[in-house]
Image (cartoon, coloured by chain):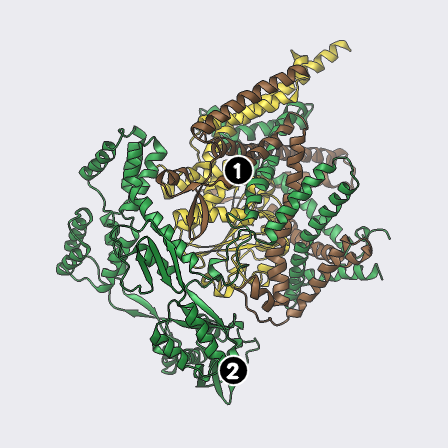
Amino acid sequence: MKRDQLIWTVLLVIGGAWLLYRCSTVGVGLVYAQEVDGKFTSVDKLEYTAGTAQIDWLRTLGVWTAAFFTLGIMSFLYKDNPFYKICESVVVGVSAAYWMVLGYWTVVVPNLLGRIWPAWIQSWAMPGISPLREGYWYMNVIPLVFGVMLLWRLAPKGAWIARWPLAFIIGTTAGLRLMGFMQADFLSQIRAGVGPILAINAESGIDFWDTVRNVVMLLSVLACLVYFFFSIEHKGAVGKVAKVGIWVLMITFGAAFGYTVMGRIALLAIRLEFLFNEWLALG
Amino acid sequence: MKRTIPLLITGIGGFVLILAFFIPYTESWGEVAAVWFDVMAAIAFLLGGGNLMKVHLKKISDRAAGWAYSLIVLLAFLLTLWTGLFKTGSKPADNQEYYGESFASLSVADLPDSMLAEIEGSLPEKVDAELPPSVRRQLSVENGKLRFRGWMTDDHVSDLKSYHETLEWQCKVETLAAAAKPPEVLSGKVSYHSDHQVLSFHGYMSDAEHTALVALGKSAAWSQAVKILFDASRVETRIKSEEIPKGYQLPESVKNVQVSNGELVIQGPMSAALRDQVAAGQATVPFVRPMTKEQRAAFRREIESKGQPLTGEQAVALETTFNTVWTSVQLRLALVTAGQPSEVPKTACEMLIEQQAGVQDIKPKRIVGTAVGINDAQGAVLAKFSTDPSVSIDQAVEQLRAAGEFNDAQEKGLKKFLDRVPNQIDFDKSVATALNGAGPLAEEQKEFLLGDYRKRFLWRRDVGRLFVASHVPKYEWSGDYAEQGTGFWFAYEYAMKPLTATMFAMLAFYVASAAFRAFRAKNIEASLLLGTAFIILLGRTQAGVILTAWFPDAIGGLRIDSLTVYIMSVFNTAGNRAIMIGIALGIASTSLKVLLGMDRSYLGND
Amino acid sequence: MIDFLANLDRRWIFLLMLLSVAIPILTGVSFEEVPSKQAKDVFQEIENLKPGDKVLMAWDFGPETEGELGPMATAFCRQVCEKKAKLYFIAIVPLGPRMIDRTIENIIRADFPDLVYGEDYVNLGYKSGNEGVIKVIVTDLRGLYTTDARGTNIDQITMCKDVENLQQMDLIVSVSGSYPGTKEWVQYAVSPYPDKIKMVGGCTGVQAPLLYPYIPGQLKGLLGAIKGAAEYEKLVVDEYIGDSPHPKYLEGKRRMGPQLIAHLLMIGLIILGNVVFFCQRAREGQQA
């Protein structure tokens, strides 16, 4: 443990010294902002050099905070530690508030309150909407009532009250999904799967390789479906077909794995780009 | 009761959506259900926040393990919530603020009778819909007359026209609009916003305008409103400015702004157009012409004379920037386009006359003028003009007219083209950007390229300050809660964004560790999975291409990148299609179970 | 040696991963892309747009997947702007609005300053309800969107006046991170109106394989992960920008450098892991 601590102390000291050096020479994490019509927008360093922007210390502090959070989360790779826990707590709090604010300003205000009491909403929050009620505006009273009932869950008593809106949410979700999946993922897929097998080429007649492709594809789908069919025991011919089905599925999962790896790396790359370019100004 | 009604609600909610799918008549029912669902989803966000607070407050009050972290969660939550709900730091929305206008409250009923326009006619028959909300308060039908109280705007006209798509009605709207206009002297200066119930005056009110406005009505409410507007339109705002350009002159048309002795003064509010006019002043910066080889070399020498020579990369960047300047070919094309006959939309009344005259195929637009091209002699004029700085725009126009037919639209087109091409300041700035991106620049070089840009900017900044200072916010809360610079934006940009993004980025590490520990070719299935993953990993980067590029074309299909395509489009598609079909069936059955009340687990136990 | 590897602290693997991504970023390794058929299909579909066509830009991703999807969004926006089509931005994931703001700021305002808000592009903003939103606006846009994201009345926005629902869109461009996203657009917009609505998409690596069955019937083209982004980006840059594009148009290409090294590392790790596994098994076999 002692050796560990020593190594980390040395690394941190070196890192800190280097950061200090960079701060004093090129500046680290500096953000420049330009004032136009009373609003400040972040701009690149050239504007600062040109004398049309100034260093925005608040945003600079922001970049340092962002760097701290980035490193804080990454520190979990070494081991669980208080910094990571702090970051985790912050993200939970900020995200919940973000969702709440978003729901409030983008839906509750315009689509609920703004439809029931448009004149009131127009007078302070959304001057752009019409202050007159539309026909059938009273239909929006129901989601308002349901909404209040849903929020009742927070109250210590009367948990059953929230069941009505919950029942509505579950019912509509089921209805939506049922149709969406049946049409797009069941019927359309069957249609796409059994499409023309013979690939006809305008010039040379039947295109051999494309036809092979279509046949392989159809057989593969069927084999997989046989594998999913658990009502029959996978024995004999059925078992062999099911085996092929598993192979196709394994290839599918292999492809999924390859693509997943690919995605993850790009996500890491953008974070490192942030640290190197925006914070440390190495780029 | 506690269970039956929820079960009914579930069933109805779901089946309405399913019915809407099959029966077109019930489509709108499904829409209503879906809208409710969407609103409930937003309320669920509120519930989520409330729940989070409840849980963590309890943890803190119980001093449970890790309560300090709960405190952090709570603080982060409340702080973000505060900044978002109260829009801290958010400026009122530009598009809702009516810059340059002064408002005085006045209800529609208080509008004087001189603002009542009447024409013979009535509303179109057989229209169920209500009148568009924008005109509902002002339009009425009395004694066979259409009456509009107030002045009609373009929005009113277009809303009313789309109320009923017949030429008769639309022509009536046009006639009404022609009648519902302010007196000539106030044209473009006053408006009445019925949505906001305000009388509005644009800019500074001259004495003549004041007299005309007072004369429109006699009621106390009207006089009061006019007085408020008069006072507001003459409020003086002044700011200090040390950035007034040398020899600056205001455009002649601007009367209510004074620039002197390090001070900017305005009477009344400032519109965005006035702001831009004041910022530009009378002087114009010359536009940049395409440069010849010699001119380019001279420009480069001038930059280099101010500091170190350009690096190779900078030289390339400079050359690229030169090439972005317009060419005489582009100009010629623009003039040919400008010389095309223009299409002017016909009014509904004009089309109505045609319809009554029995015209079958009524075109909504009229063609004005004949096509005028650019002949070779004119082309030569343009070519010379594009490189010779001694030829002014007016001279060029003169020469173009002398060389052949050249109409006013083309002259306008020429000026518009040159207005839009970068001027010297813009060009120098883009040179600076390009050079700075490709290598170092000395201070003096930067000053040479950016000095004028800075002066222009600082002056514009000060005019912008006057623009803001002279404005009285009308809707403090109309701004964007997440606009750059607001508290909420800070919370997102510098906390939520790095945190969520890094959390996802961590998966890269775990996937690497899993690859080392868990992916074992134990049997055929596992080997297939691994093999595919190998091919995809290689095939979706340059490695696959490099490794197998030497394969002869006969077995080109075996190149890794081709194999990748084949795997994805055949086996992967097949496997996922089968999975999709399976999942769809699963979802269908679970959904039906819920809707038919067979699965009631979501209702809980009591 | 085998024992050492078998008991290797996974933090060494983490370090290797970090280096394999960090070093290429710092050194700026990059390669030329050769566009695949998928990328070309997407490009061509947008290329077929006529000036004035309406394009719904469904930005359903957030900063967590921006690494993969940011470059696609940038290139999509560029090409659609170049085609002089009208852009309608919309988001059904909570963080989408921030991505729309970025695209508008970095691409439209920076490189197409002549485009006018409300006439050439509009930001309709976010609505909650996931696929429920699509379900409504596919038949009635005003059912949910009475204003744009800035609070302007939708009936006063020139380019929205004549739009009643999504069926009037000439193309949907969906960039999506997870749920809800491209799949939901296919399910609730394209599938019910196959003759009216066309769509191309860009999605994360995790989603891409799952969406392949929709091609080409329900989805005209799909860009998968950063590779798809880099290929498509190249097509757009070659066609519309030419030499020395701004670095923001090369993000995909830049991220393919770290991608290559990291993929090689992954392959190395899998092979090494298997070598360890087989050696151990052989040893156990001898002992038994």
Q: Nearer the viewer, mark 2 or mark 1?
A: 1
As drawn, the label of residue B140 is 2
- Residue B229 is left or right of residue B584, and the answer is left
Q: From the rendered image, report the letter of the chain displayed in yellow.
A: C
Quarter-of-image position of residue A244: top right
How far across and how far down the image is residue A143, in percent?
A: 69, 62
Residue at the right extreme of this rendering? B606
Q: Amino acid at mark 2?
A: Ser
Whether residue A201 appears in this view of the structure is: no
Whether residue C228 appears in this view of the structure is: yes
Residue at the left extreme of this rendering? B402
Q: Colour of chain B?
A: green
Q: Residue at x 48, y 80 (%)?
A: B111
Residue closer to the observer: C162 or B503 = B503
Residue at the bottom extreme of this rendering? B143
* Callout 2: SS: strand
- Residue C286 is left or right of residue C110, and the answer is right
The subunit carrying tag 1 is A
The subunit carrying tag 2 is B
Residue at the front extreme of this rendering? B261
Q: Which residue is the site of mark 1?
A: A61
Q: CA distance from mark 2 to mark 1?
A: 59 Å
